[in-house]
Image (tube, rainbow, N blue to C red):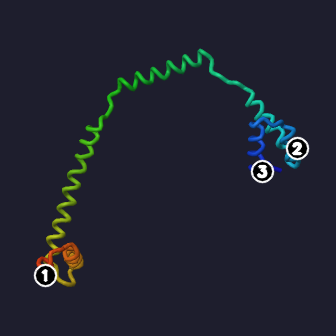
Amino acid sequence: MAIKEATLIASLEALEAGESIDAILARYPEDARELRPVLQTARAFADLRLAPSAAGKAASRRAFLDQAAALRGRPQRSVALWFRSFSRALVPAALALALVVGGTYTLSQNALPGQPLYGMKLEIESLRLDQQRDPAALEQLEE
């Protein structure tokens, strides 16, 4: 039978709070056989005071500083360089989009009912009427 997750979490929290293994096992007698080795292992790990050796610390520091020096020597891309390369792609795309939208708008102004751009013509006229606040200009648009 597997230990329930809630039981395991509560047991480990009680162990961390300083309760004895026997006191914890008394609360969960049905899981005691499987829970004991887990709690003993957790207690053993808690008792270990692992700290890196001086040689390990020195090697780690040396590796970190070597990596930092290697990064310092490598040319880095600036934000301006990134923006310049991005704008080289964006400007032609925006220009092409403006030409397509402008051309479609111009062509739709002469569209007649039943033609593909007639729906766009009606939408544009509707938008212009909705945006107009001047009564005289509104009357002129409605003609």
Please state which of residues 75 and 52 is positioned toward the viewer in this rendering: 52
Secondary structure, mark 1, is: helix
x 32%, y 28%: residue? 75
Q: Which mark is residue 68?
A: none
- The reply, left or right, for residue 75 in relation to residue 106 is right
Q: Which of marks 3 and 1 is nearer the N terminus?
A: 3
x 76%, y 35%: residue? 42
Q: Which mark is residue 4?
A: 3
Residues tagged 3 and 1 counted as in contact (Cβ below 8 A): no
**Which corner quadrant of the image does residue 40 belong to?**
top right
**Which corner quadrant of the image does residue 16 belong to?**
top right
Residue at numbered disc 1 = 139
Please state which of residues 115 and 19 is positioned toward the viewer in this rendering: 19
State the separation of the CA atoms marked 2 and 1: 89 Å
Q: Is residue 76 positioned above or below 59 on the image?
A: below
**Which corner quadrant of the image does residue 118 belong to?**
bottom left
**Kind of residue sitting beneath label 2:** Ala
Secondary structure, mark 2, is: helix
x 73%, y 26%: residue? 48
> Residue 45's x, y, as percent?
74, 31
Secondary structure, mark 3, is: loop
State the separation of the CA atoms marked 2 and 3: 16 Å
Q: Which mark is residue 26?
A: 2
Q: Which of marks 2 and 3 is nearer the N terminus?
A: 3
Counting every numbered tag in the picture gives 3
- Where's the C terminus, which quadrant? bottom left
**Kind of residue sitting beneath label 1:** Glu
Residue 6 in view, yes or no: yes
x 79%, y 48%: residue? 3
- The reply, left or right, for residue 100 in relation to residue 15 is left
Residue 116 in view, yes or no: no
